[in-house]
Amino acid sequence: MMSQKIDLNLIKVFLAIYETGSVSGAAKRVHLTQPSISYALSRLRSLLNDPLFHRTRDGMQPTFSADKLYETFRSSLMNIELAIASTREFNPLVSQRTFRIALSDLGEVFLLPILMKKFRTLAPNISIEVIPLEVNQVEDWLVKGRIDAAVGNLTFLKGKVSSLSIFEEFYACLVCSNHPRIGKTLTLDQFINEHHVSVSRTTGHSIVEDILKKLKITRHVSLTIPHFSVLPSIISDSEVIACLPSRVAGMFAQNGNTRVMDIPLDLPTFEVGVYWENQLEDTVAQQWLTQVIQCTLSEL
């Protein structure tokens, strides 16, 4: 039978092991030694009369009981931490905290310089660690506290984590400035018949491809790449074309070697937002981070 009293620090250890999948990861998360984590886990096992985790090649795998306890423990501890956080203050001018932000390569090229300029002004001593955005991993990263925020076209996360809208965006086409067949406008026939550069769906930008499939329009993709950031060097010296968000297309076209064209299709706009999951013990700093991101980038 569970003891009527359980140390909240043991619950923090439990959550850290569950979310990181390892004793070493938990130790780093809660700033304790690995022996201390192992001792805490031993106490928890005794208190709860369950092994809680089994050590496997893939890390510490939770038992059925641990899975059931996780949501209850996390929700309860979050409520306690939120109550405490309301009495705390975060001073960005003196903070030396490291924030981890997930960004796509477009975010790194276009948004990161703007954010860093603002951070240097508001919080000169903080550090930013950029994590390459992986669409199929980002929800898990947020929920488990592996990142503090994610920025991008991630509307599938709405309702699952906290979010703020930053701006609406639409897709445009980037072509070589001296393209031999494309003049001042881009016709649908030209768009379909030209060779395209496609960027991996893992970036979260698949709207154009999805619309083409719905319309049963086939385009010739001569190159598929994992990142948008190499497009200027590819497009400027070839006849291939590419679809990408308009703001970034405009930035790429500033070099004079490429130009931006309207896509001759009825495409929906999409929302760029900042997404986060409130993290234990760090809610005030995290709220500051997400609000600065939203306020800074919404002016673009």
Image (tube, rainbow, N blue to C red):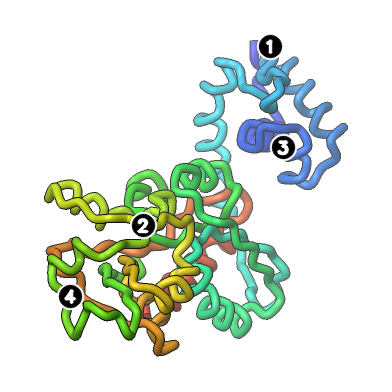
Q: Callout 2, which amino acid?
A: Ser
Badge 4 crowding class, 10 Å Cα cut-off, few under 14, some 14 to 19, many 20 or more, is: some
Q: Which mark is residue 49?
A: 1
Closer-to-camera residue (19/185): 185
Q: Which residue is mark 4?
A: 186
Name the residue located 15 percent from the left edge and 47 percent from the top edge.
214
Real-space Cα distance between discs 1 and 4? 69 Å
Task: Check disc 4 and report its element: helix, strand or loop.
Answer: loop
Residue 3 seen in the current view: no
Real-space Cα distance between discs 1 and 2? 60 Å
Left-right relation of 184 to 115: left
Q: Quadrant of residue 127?
A: bottom right
Nearer mark to the viewer, of 1 and 2:
2
Query: From the image, which quarter does the N terminus lie in?
Result: top right
Q: Position of residue 186 (x, y in %)?
A: 17, 75
Real-space Cα distance between discs 3 and 4? 62 Å
Real-space Cα distance between discs 2 and 3? 56 Å
